[in-house]
Image (tube, rainbow, N blue to C red):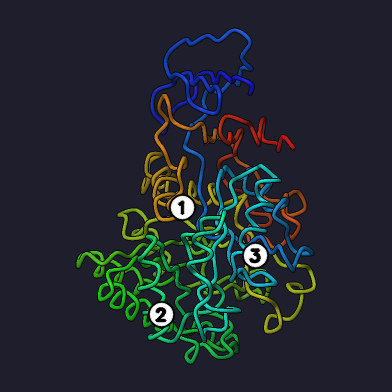
Amino acid sequence: MTTHLIKGARPLGGDPADILVSDGRIAAIGDSLSAPGAEVVEAAGLVALPGLVDLHTHLREPGREDAETVETGSRAAALGGFTAVHAMANTDPVADTAGVVEQVWRLGRETGLVDVVPVGAVTVGLAGERLAELGAMADSAARVRVFSDDGHCVADPALMRRALEYVKAFDGVIAQHAEEPRLTAGAQMHEGDRSARLGLTGWPAAAEEAIIARDVLLAEHVGARLHVCHVSTAGSVEILRWAKSRGVRVTAEVTPHHLLLTDACAESYDPVFKVNPPLRTDADVEALRAGLADGTVDAVGTDHAPHAVEDKESEWAQARPGMLGLEQALSVVIETMVGPGRLDWAGVADRMSVRPAAIGRLEGHGRPIAPGEPANLVLVDPAARSVVDPAALASRSRNSPYAGRELPGRVVATFLRGTPTVLEGKATR
């Protein structure tokens, strides 16, 4: 394994230091380090962070390789600074058995760009009728610890309670897609004045908030771990804040697009802005930023959702919901949180690496930048700015909501256990 000497990086935005990476670990940190034969990475002006961890990625394989594969999604993740991603279960076949999650896990290992961590389905076929093989998936080679029917809500409260009880045995977590389906039938965008004016069926904030309120009470009753996917409303943040004050074992994520974009994007009728849950109001965006800043919202989860052209480039009502997110996630956080002073670089590391790794029970990720720790690292140029070009993205799909937008920050290098997967801003394989 090649030794790398990273010269002059700023760990967590602090003072410059040299970082020596050898045998997959950080061997030393200090001033003016030398290592004969090491490959030198000039990193003056770059911020060093622990490799990012995404709790919410759709890789589409098996079944929809026309939209994304484990290989293309892994490359997008590495270019975005990620060293681990959780691959959601809504594949075809659904990842509801040990066999399917092991297939996804092995594809990730073969690709070798990031650690691909499968998420198991909560219910068979995501149908919400009976529990999937949670124990078998947990005991499989993939060691599944996160279970989600994402794309569908586990709407039956009795079934949700049983799932929470079941995963307690192996310290698993149920990641809920919070959407009361009887309140969102036919919904196309956030319910409000704008949806009425545009003639699009509204999606009320209460549909999300009602499920979160129900589930934090269930989690408290059972004493289990609950994670809330893609929180999008101010009311949801308040419910989470209340639940945490009571000691409920609940965590939550917010997507980059819900931190940056609002329902005003729907004015264009461009289906690239159609997403589940929908883009919300300015007030919701402000509450989400505040919740991420104070830790009520634990993590940034990309909800990277690639779609083939025919599934997106259609009339709004027929278009599939979802947006790309992996390659621009860190840039959006810099734009919305670091630039305005709501998070420092240590805070970015906490919300995009440390806490996601802890929620997913990942070993070797989200660790301090310190001697002896696994060398899962990302080097970021905070001064760089670039315009997003969907055609230049690594994903097999092109449904980026940031097309044509100038965003700050550039991932210069990503190291997975000491091996560069991105160097000089380009994937190494």
Crowdedness of circle 1 by 10 Å Cα count: few (<14), some, many (20+)? Answer: some
Q: In the rendered image, which residue does mark 3 sit on? A: 100
- Closer to the chain start, of discs 2 and 3, is 3
Q: Is residue 352 left or right of residue 238?
A: right
Residue named by callout 2: 160
Task: Tell me which numbered mark, 1 or 3, is placed earlier along the sequence.
Answer: 3
Give the x, y percent position of residue 260: 50, 60
Q: Nearer the viewer, residue 151 or 312?
A: 151
**Amino acid type of the residue that numbered disc 3 sits on in the rendered structure:** Val
Looking at the image, do the residues carrying marks 1 and 3 touch, with CB atoms under 8 Å apart? no
Three-letter residue code for mark 2: Met
Above or below: residue 274 compared with residue 403:
below
Element at badge 2?
A: helix
The local secondary structure at tag 3 comes to helix
Query: For the residues carrying marks 1 and 3, which lies nearer the camera in this image?
Result: 3
The residues bearing labels 1 and 2 have C-alpha atoms spaced at a distance of 34 Å
Q: In the rendered image, which residue does mark 1 sit on?
A: 336
Which residue occupies 74% across, 68% down? Answer: 63
